[in-house]
Image: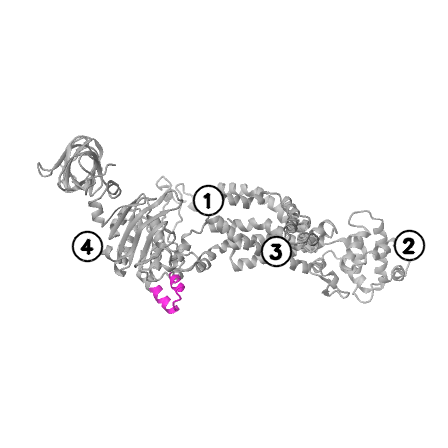
Amino acid sequence: MSDATLDMPVGGTAQRAGNEPLVAADGTPLKQKLAQTTRRMKLRALMLTMPLVLFVLIAFVAPIGDMLFRSLYNPTGSNVVPAFAEAIQQWDGQDLPSEETVKIFVEDLAKARRSREIGRTVGNLATRLNYELPGYRSLVTKTARRAARITEGPYKEALFAIDKRWEERIVWTTLQRITKDYTLAFYLAATDRKYDADGSIVQADELYRIYVPILWKTIWVSALITALCFIIAYPVSYLLSTLPLRISNLLMILVLLPFWTSLLVRTSAWIAMLQTEGVVNNIFVYLGIITDESRIQMIYNLQGTIIAMVHILLPFMILPLYSVMKTIPPSYMRAARSMGASGTYAFMRVYFPQTVPGIAAGTLLVFILAIGYYITPALVGGNDGLLISNLIADHIKKTLNWSLGAALGTILLVVVLVFYWLYNKLVGVDNLKFG
Amino acid sequence: MNKSASQSQARDDAFVRFENVQKSYDGEVLVVKDLNVDIAEGEFLTMLGPSGSGKTTSLMMLAGFEPATHGEIYLAGESINNVPPNKRGIGMVFQNYALFPHMTVAENLAFPLKVRRMGRADIEERVQRALDMVELPQMGGRRPAQLSGGQQQRVAVARALVFEPKLVLMDEPLGALDKQLREQMQYEIKHIHENLGVTVVYVTHDQTEALTMSDRVAVFEDGVIQQLSAPDELYERPQNSFVAQFIGENNKFDGTVSAISNDSCTVELNGGGTVQAARVGDLVGQGDRTTLSLRPERVEIAPKNGALPNVLTGEIIELIYLGDHIRTRMRVAGNEEFIVKVPNSADHVPLAEGAKVNVGWKTEDCRALDPL
């Protein structure tokens, strides 16, 4: 720094000499000095957020990444029959694979039959093939049992002798496809599509089209639940926000009380209420509205799912609405009235528009929660009350088709993100008020 | 003369009339006790009082947001007790302005016109005229949040006036503004009132505001109007001790009336000394206790001998230099809070703390009011 800066008056005042940058009293440029003094503060702020950052990375980003990866990556084929996996890729898909390739397949199968390593057994391959060609599981297991006895060619004829289905070209094209590690097959399955013998994408057979209808059902059920929550919550929130504090606090506790109760307890309570021998039916019978023989099936179906979920998600609608309504002073409505607006007109033009941020937040919250809801539909949904998340859980826990579960999960995530994006377009996320 | 003429006129053709109006929220306490006021067309009437005195409640009853528990309210000769607020045609300016945040300024102003189903061209013209009136001609496209407090205030006034109501109510409209802006807005509202000839009922707890703007001021306390007078009358001739205390600064002495004549009385001060004071109606009689009220600027320091009927000796306790005047706190007849405002003229009496000086005042400036 120039000598001039040394003549600076003590006390930290900085002066601008000509075009020179501002300097602090000790001669360092002011910007640098500022950065120095705030660095420690920034570092501390960063350190404070580290536990959360790590937690989010481990508990959120990593699992989602893993899910995305699993939905595309499935090495079962190449694990079970590694040599064949390489050889079959040479095949052009016309007629049947060469005698040499089939020989490798038979040898690989024979080897795999002796394997006890998890993920490398014949059963794994059979299951994998069965995903794509339902009913073809036995083809692989049966053939594997006899593969060791096939010692010399012609190998193709030997296979045909075991099972006629080896003559079908689609078995081999499917084998060719599932021995590649990366595949879109699970996304196709998740959207009720499949590859045909030529490798082009076609609709699945009518019987197997289940995921897309369930996804649509999940979306409209969630939308219906959101709408019901809104219709119930809006007047309640309005009441809460306008009543004297003492009473509104009491009512607020009533709103929050179920919120603090275990989800399972609340769902079970609905079972007790709604089952055919339950409280509601008993009251109906007692009042003579229905006869004892014609008790209404209110739970273990879609209706039960909707009732229980509306109840459980209601606070998520009430709270943002209430917090927004609380900030709207009564003078707005009064002003509108004094200017000649009727109560309805004032409400529609003045009050309602101001609650939009709360409505947006509430509906988004409830919709997103509803679309991924699992436990309640699982407990009270019966068969027709099941939602997409129940299918995902099924694939993760029961059928162990993790790749398909992951693909469905990813699709659900994308759907939520699309809705979020739409919301942002329509209302603007900055306008959301959660409370 | 003039004042009393306008008052009697107000009684003849009252534009707004409160008749025996009472209001209770809980059935236990009367917030407004037997309110009777006549407001003339074109008048600027201010309801002044401390918080909880019933002034805002009275305004809300007039606007139609609170029903009167008892009594009748008339607007232009018609009882409006059962008319909903939107049918009363009364403009209103709220304390927090109540500008609709989701609408632009122009949309806010157009709101009462749209409600009345006016044509678009007509609405645009009136909105522009209203904006011009409050000197914000370019602000129509802004949102209220983008305006300063003073600008929001003007828009609120414009919105209350844009549909040309005969009566405009203002509920502490300047409360949120800083002092300088508040003074400026006082004059602007006053000028708008004068130019449009609209009747204004104004609620405030700020006495300066009330004195500056109003034709008449109603001083509220405990649900009762203590005095309803023109500002000068209110300040110079308070009818009771509450008004004297509430409006402006006030020196008070406690004493007993020893003799009364036509319009004056003799009062023996509790702190020693005898003074002549003006009688206020029949408020006090012989032998009654009384509180004397005396404005600080009406006290003369070291008066010439015999020039004033009331002279007492006091001791200067504190001097505060305020530029245009010197605020002098004295001990006079046992009252240690006796304030004299000594104008800072070139030849004012030299003052020193601890000095003993005579203070004097005219009989009519010292009013014998009800004891506090």
Q: Which residue is mark 1?
A: A245
- Distance from disc 1 to disc 3, alpha carbons, whole Å, reads 33 Å
Q: Which residue is mark 2?
A: A149
Distance from Cα at disc 2 to Cα at disc 1: 85 Å
Tag 2 near tag 4, CB within 8 Å = no
Give the percent coordinates (x, y) of residue A93: 79, 65
Of pointers 1 and 3, the one earlier in the residue sequence: 3
Q: Residues within 10 Å of mark 3 (few under 14, many from 20)?
A: many
Secondary structure state at the residue bearing disc 4: helix
Q: Which residues are magenta?
A: B109-128
| Mark nearer the viewer, 2 or 4 | 4
- Callout 1: chain: A
Q: Position of residue B364 (x, y in %)?
A: 15, 42
Q: Which image quadrant: the C terminus of chain B? A: top left
The answer to whether residue B266 shows anywhere in this view is yes
Mark 3 belongs to which amino acid? Ser
